[in-house]
Amino acid sequence: MTPTDKDRSELLGEYMVKNKATVRACAKQFGISKSTVHKDVSQRLEKINPSLYKKVKKLMDNNKAQRHIRGGMATKAKYQKRKSDK
């Protein structure tokens, strides 16, 4: 693992915890792929900084549990917008 991977993993983890960000939001903020963010915070971070990893894992588990609700809200908003455009 290169030093930049270590630095990036911790930076991403800290950003996610501080902002309660999703993997998608974090990827967009840093201009990298969701896959890279997920690998950094779910695999590399566990070895680098276990205490930060636990915080990130708790946040990711919570985001996953709420994902279906956010998806439903987005779909509802989409169809309400279509209806109001007519």
Image: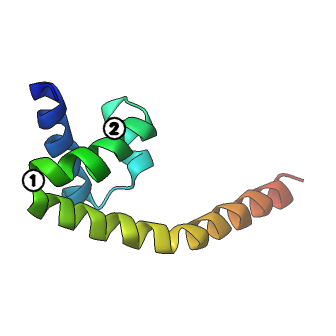
* Relative height, residue 3 to residue 73 (above, below): above
Residue 78: image location, x then y, percent = 73, 57
Picture quadrant where residue 59 is located: bottom left
Residue 22: image location, x then y, percent = 39, 55
Residue drawn at x 47%, y 67% is 64
Q: Is residue 62 visible?
A: yes
Mark nearest the camera among 2 and 1 is 1
- In the image, taking residue 31 as reference, residue 68 lies left or right, namely right
Task: Report, in whole angstroms, how far the alpha carbon at label 2 lies from the one at label 1.
Answer: 22 Å
Determine which residue is flagged by label 2.
Answer: 29
Instruction: Give whichever of 6, 85 is nearer the camera.
Output: 6
Q: Under tag 2, what secondary structure?
A: helix
Which colour style is shown? Answer: rainbow
Q: Under tag 1, what secondary structure?
A: loop
- What kind of residue is marked 1? Asn
Q: Pick out the residue farthest to the right.
A: 86
Q: How busy is the neighbourhood of tag 2: few (under 14 within 10 Å), some, or many (20 plus)?
A: few
Determine which residue is flagged by label 1.
Answer: 49
Residue drawn at x 48%, y 74% is 65
Q: Quadrant of the N terminus?
A: top left
- What kind of residue is marked 2? Gln
Residue drawn at x 29%, y 71% is 58
Residue drawn at x 22%, y 44% is 44
* Relative height, residue 9 to residue 1 (above, below): below
Instruction: Give whichever of 79, 21 is nearer the camera.
Output: 21
* Relative height, residue 30 to residue 56 (above, below): above
Instruction: Give whichever of 81, 43 is nearer the camera.
Output: 43
Earlier-in-chain disc, 2 versus 1:
2
Q: Is residue 14 visible?
A: no
